Image (spheres, rainbow, N blue to C red):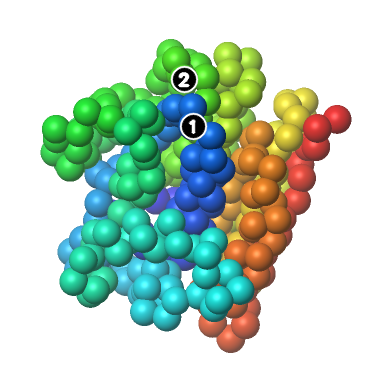
């Protein structure tokens, strides 16, 4: 499948991915020490939901629009504050038009001592990303293959932070590439937090991915998944997942509150489902 960010900005998968991102960042912000976020497939950073690409699919109407126009109930509202604040910051008139990708969501939450490294291989996307962050001394944008960069840019000098891996799945073998990259970078920086996003289209691919992750022997791997419809034949995108290595202590409990709500809000006819599982614990 081709998961170029512009066509799917603000859809259900983005909502899950970016809420998870903000909860991890919220944990990092609890300590005064600086941290760094490395975004390996950053895209352009900001998306016009009224533009040709987003309007062609209209997926954002069943994603961020369902949260922006109808806020979460009080029981979970506080957990959504950083995410919705990041979206509202790009729509100050209160009308939903622009959606922040992961670099903008991250940058919205950083303090003056924190840094963002945003990598993007696609030339026109990389140029747009540079323009979007022009003059921002806390953000470094580099036109570079995120897979290759993981071997040279870790660990960061701060020794605290997050690596977000969100490939477009334009080529075959992305699941294998994610496993191979994790094995490589985890040896270089075993204490870092890693978040790998993936689409759920063919359950066999997802099952094989989980088995391959378990076979690495890496500890503390948490899997979060949300589907908005049943699997179909032929396979189509019906869900998405996040693999979190070294997740913050409170993340599992927070997602136990967040995902049931999203499964209901982002699906039709009560078809949403969620899963929270440990592929590997601490021992």
Does residue 279 appear left or right of residue 118 in this picture?
right
Does residue 280 appear left or right of residue 12 in this picture?
right
| Separation of marks 1 and 2 at Cα, in angstroms | 12 Å
One can see residue 18 in this view: yes
Residue occupying the far bottom of the picture: 269
Residue 51 point in image, percent of width and height:
18, 64
Q: Secondary structure at mark 2?
A: loop
Determine the residue positioned at 76% across, 41% down: 279
The quarter of the image holding the C terminus is top right
**Pointer 1 and pointer 2: residues touching (CB < 8 Å)?**
no
Quadrant of the rendered structure where residue 184 is? top right
Q: How many other residues sit within 10 Å of disc 1, few (<14), some (14-19) or many (≥20)?
A: few
Determine the residue positioned at 38% across, 31% down: 114
Of 15 and 22, the residue lying toward us: 22
Q: How many other residues sit within 10 Å of disc 2, few (<14), some (14-19) or many (≥20)?
A: few
Q: Would you place residue 153 above or below residue 203 in this image?
A: above
Quadrant of the rendered structure where residue 76 is? bottom right
Residue occupying the far right of the picture: 283
The dot on residue 256 is: none
Residue ID for mark 1 = 32
Residue occupying the far front of the picture: 32
Q: Would you place residue 75 above or below residue 122 in this image?
A: below
Q: Secondary structure at mark 1?
A: loop
Residue 212 point in image, percent of width and height:
71, 34
Query: Which of the two labelled residues, at mark 1 and mark 2, occupies the earlier sequence position?
Result: 1
- Circle 1 or circle 2, nearest the eye: 1
Of 110 and 19, the residue lying toward us: 110
One can see residue 52 in this view: no
Determine the residue positioned at 63% across, 15% down: 187
Residue ID for mark 2 = 158
Q: Would you place residue 148 above or below residue 243 in this image?
A: above
């Amino acid at each position: 499948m081709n998961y170029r960010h512009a066509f799917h900005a603000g859809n259900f998968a983005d909502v899950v991915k970016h809420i998870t991102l903000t909860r991890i960042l919220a944990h990092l912000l609890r300590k005064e020490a600086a941290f760094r976020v490395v975004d390996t497939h950053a895209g352009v950073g900001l998306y016009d939901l009224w533009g040709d690409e987003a309007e062609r699919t209209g997926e954002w109407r069943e994603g961020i629009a369902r949260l922006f126009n109808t806020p979460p109930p009080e029981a979970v509202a506080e957990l959504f504050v950083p995410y919705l604040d990041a979206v509202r910051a790009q729509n100050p008139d209160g009308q939903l038009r622009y959606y922040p990708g992961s670099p903008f969501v991250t940058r919205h939450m950083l303090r003056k001592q924190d840094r963002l490294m945003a990598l993007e291989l696609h030339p026109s996307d990389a140029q747009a990303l540079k323009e979007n962050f022009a003059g921002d001394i806390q953000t470094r944008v580099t036109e570079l293959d995120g897979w290759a960069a993981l071997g040279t840019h870790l660990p960061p000098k701060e020794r605290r932070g997050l690596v977000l891996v969100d490939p477009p799945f334009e080529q075959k073998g992305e699941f294998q590439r994610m496993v191979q990259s994790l094995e490589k970078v985890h040896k270089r920086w075993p204490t870092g937090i890693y978040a790998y996003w993936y689409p759920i289209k063919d359950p066999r691919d997802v099952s094989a991915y989980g088995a391959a992750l378990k076979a690495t022997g890496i500890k503390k791997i948490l899997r979060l998944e949300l589907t908005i419809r049943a699997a179909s034949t032929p396979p189509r995108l019906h869900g998405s997942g996040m693999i979190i290595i070294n997740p913050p202590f409170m993340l599992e409990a927070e997602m136990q509150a967040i995902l049931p709500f999203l499964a209901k809000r982002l699906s039709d006819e009560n078809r949403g489902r969620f899963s929270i599982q440990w592929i590997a614990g601490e021992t």
